[in-house]
Amino acid sequence: MSCRLNAEELEPFYCDVNCDKARELINDYRELKEFHVIDTRSIEMYKMGHLNKAVLLDAFKSNFSELLGYLPKDHVYLVYCTAGIRSLKAIKLMKQMGFKYVYHLYEGIEGCDIKLGDLSIS
């Protein structure tokens, strides 16, 4: 599987991506209203800096699965955290819940370091 969303390929996918691929996805899907970036860290970590337009959904909160339940399952998601632990928990749950198109920034933003560049940390 190409791990890429396009009109011809509507098969669900759960794909690990590195920082360069995340940058490419954000640039490619920036205008797509069905594309969402989810930060799975704590509110304190989020306030220290996050990807531009990222929605905070702390994967360690007790109501995390309930909050995921409000999201459209056929939209495209890029999920990240600091080092890939919380986001991995999140994408496993998203898969169980039937989300179709999920990209996982497996390095976390910590692994991206200076490479984030135009990903716009706010």
Image: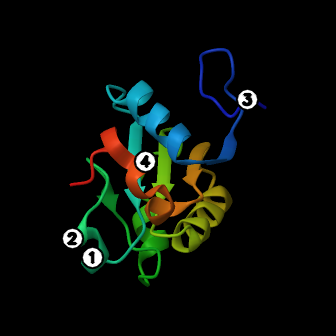
Mark 4 to mark 1 CA distance (whole Å)? 23 Å
Q: Which mark is residue 2?
A: 3
Image height check: is 57 above or below 113? below
- Secondary structure beneath disc 2? helix
Image point (27%, 76%), residue name: 43
- Secondary structure beneath disc 4? helix
Image height check: is 52 above or below 26? below
Left or right relative to 88: residue 71: left
Q: Could you tell which of marks 2 and 4 lies nearer the N-terminus?
A: 2
Give percent across and percent down for residue 6. 60, 20
Image height check: is 117 above or below 65? above
Image point (40%, 66%), residue name: 67
Q: Could you tell which of marks 3 and 4 lies nearer the N-terminus?
A: 3
The residue that label 4 is drawn on is 115
Mark 2 and 3 residues: CB-CB less than 8 Å, in contact?
no
Callout 1 amino acid:
Ile
Mark 1 and 2 residues: CB-CB less than 8 Å, in contact?
yes
Closer mark to the observer between disc 1 and disc 2:
2
Quadrant for the N terminus, please: top right
Q: Could you tell which of marks 4 and 1 lies nearer the N-terminus?
A: 1
The residue that label 2 is drawn on is 47
Closer mark to the observer between disc 2 and disc 4:
4
Mark 3 and 1 residues: CB-CB less than 8 Å, in contact?
no
Q: Residues within 10 Å of mark 2 (few under 14, many from 20)?
A: few
Q: Could you tell which of marks 3 and 1 lies nearer the N-terminus?
A: 3
Q: In the depicted view, which residue is nearer to us: 90 or 104?
A: 104
The residue that label 1 is drawn on is 43
Image point (27%, 53%), residue name: 121
Callout 4 amino acid:
Lys
